[in-house]
């Protein structure tokens, strides 16, 4: 099958099908073969892997994945792209396209139905729309799906937040959420010029290698993430003030006892705490409640 990842071929397909880009769906199609190669090589996909691709567009990346993977399930929300995908992926017998919103899918059920092999190795590879990057990533992570990794093209700013370390400007609740479930690794930086239409910002390809178990042991995940969120909701506040005035409305006396017990200075700010320290706080609060 002819590759379609070039400005000329992409424009021809768009014109032939009279396709209109949807701003609300954040559609940007990749037109650079080198970047597509980098994504697939960076994902470390092999002939033994099953792949879920979110938002295949016209199938440029899908073609590259299909040549390396055992099987590809491409999930596309825009029904006007389905006839295009039927054509551009016609030569790939190991690809199945479904017209669905990934955020509304029961992914456990889909994976069980599509990837029937016991202990199937499943990877996620996607050029994600910027406006739903975080909800899609967190859905795959929080639902504890049987995936090995996620290799995704996302906005540079969001990628930097995902891999950020304590006491840096990019470090926040998203850093902790992603690093709780995975090891993030930046694969490549991508300029706007490799897309049609061109986005206004640089992109990054990042791979999240999913951990066998969460990075830290917490007694109550919901409490842990609520504490993280409160700690970062007002970055200039001390931990004591942020946690006592946040959504959890924790009593200052309780917090002082907790901080003393685990030897964390209540005057520190959330952005200085490592994920292990947040786990200590959450577990101590859980034990005291």
Image (spheres, grey):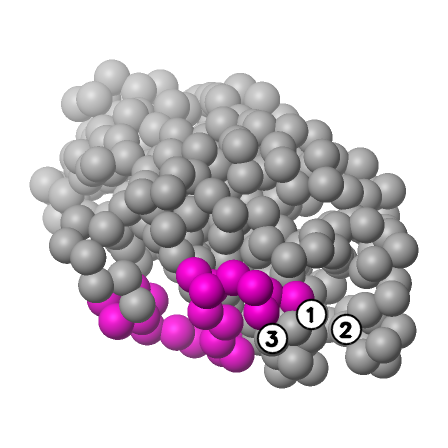
Where residue 219 sits: x, y (%)? 14, 43
Q: Nearer the viewer, mark 3 or mark 1?
A: 3
Residue 111 belongs to the span the image colors magenta = yes
- Work out whether residue 284 or residue 145 is closer to the camera in this orientation and state it: 145
Q: Which residues are magenta?
A: 88-113
Name the quadrant containing residue 160: top right
Residue 253 shown left or right of residue 63 in the figure: left
Find the distance from the CA under tag 3 to the CA under tag 1.
20 Å
Task: Give the vertical position of 199 relative to 266 (above or below).
Answer: below
Residue 231 image label:
none
Callout 1–callout 2 Cβ contact below 8 Å: yes
Tell me the SS state at disc 1: loop
Find the distance from the CA under tag 2 to the CA under tag 3.
20 Å
User: Residue visible at 53% across and 32% down?
Assistant: 41
Label 2 Cα crowd, 10 Å radius (few <14 / some 14-19 / many 20+): few
Name the quadrant containing residue 26: bottom right
Label 1 Cα crowd, 10 Å radius (few <14 / some 14-19 / many 20+): some
Tell me the SS state at disc 3: helix
Find the distance from the CA under tag 1 to the CA under tag 2.
5 Å
Residue 9 shown left or right of residue 286 in the figure: right
Task: Give the vertical position of 72 relative to 156 (above or below).
Answer: below
| Residue 172 appears in the rendering | no
Q: Which residue is mark 3?
A: 86
Where residue 95 sits: x, y (%)? 47, 64
Q: Which residue is mark 1?
A: 25
Tell me the SS state at disc 2: loop
Q: Which residue is mark 2?
A: 22
């Amino acid at each position: 099958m002819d590759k379609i990842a070039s400005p000329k071929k992409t424009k021809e397909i768009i014109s032939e099908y009279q396709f209109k880009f949807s701003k609300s769906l954040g559609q940007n199609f990749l037109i650079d073969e080198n970047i597509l190669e980098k994504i697939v090589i960076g994902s470390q996909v092999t002939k033994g892997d099953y792949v879920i691709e979110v938002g295949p567009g016209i199938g440029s990346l899908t073609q590259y994945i299909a040549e390396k993977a055992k099987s590809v399930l491409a999930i596309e929300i825009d029904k006007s792209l389905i006839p295009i995908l039927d054509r551009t992926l016609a030569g790939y017998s190991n690809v199945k396209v479904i017209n669905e919103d990934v955020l509304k899918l029961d992914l456990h059920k889909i994976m069980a139905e599509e990837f029937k092999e016991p202990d199937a190795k499943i990877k996620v590879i996607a050029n994600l729309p910027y406006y739903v990057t975080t909800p899609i990533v967190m859905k795959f992570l929080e639902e504890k799906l049987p995936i090995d990794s996620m290799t995704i093209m996302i906005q540079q700013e969001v990628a930097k937040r995902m891999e950020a370390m304590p006491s840096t400007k990019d470090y926040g609740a998203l850093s902790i959420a992603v690093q709780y479930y995975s090891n993030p690794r930046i694969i490549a930086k991508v300029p706007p010029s490799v897309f049609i239409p061109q986005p206004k910002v640089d992109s990054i390809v990042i791979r999240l290698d999913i951990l066998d178990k969460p990075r830290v042991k917490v007694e109550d995940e919901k409490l842990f993430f609520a504490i993280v969120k409160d700690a970062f909701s007002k970055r200039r506040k001390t931990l004591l003030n942020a946690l006592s005035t946040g959504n959890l409305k924790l009593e200052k006396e309780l917090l002082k006892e907790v901080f003393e017990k685990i030897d964390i200075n209540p005057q520190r700010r959330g952005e200085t705490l490592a994920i292990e320290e947040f786990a200590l706080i959450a577990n101590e609060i859980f034990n005291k409640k």
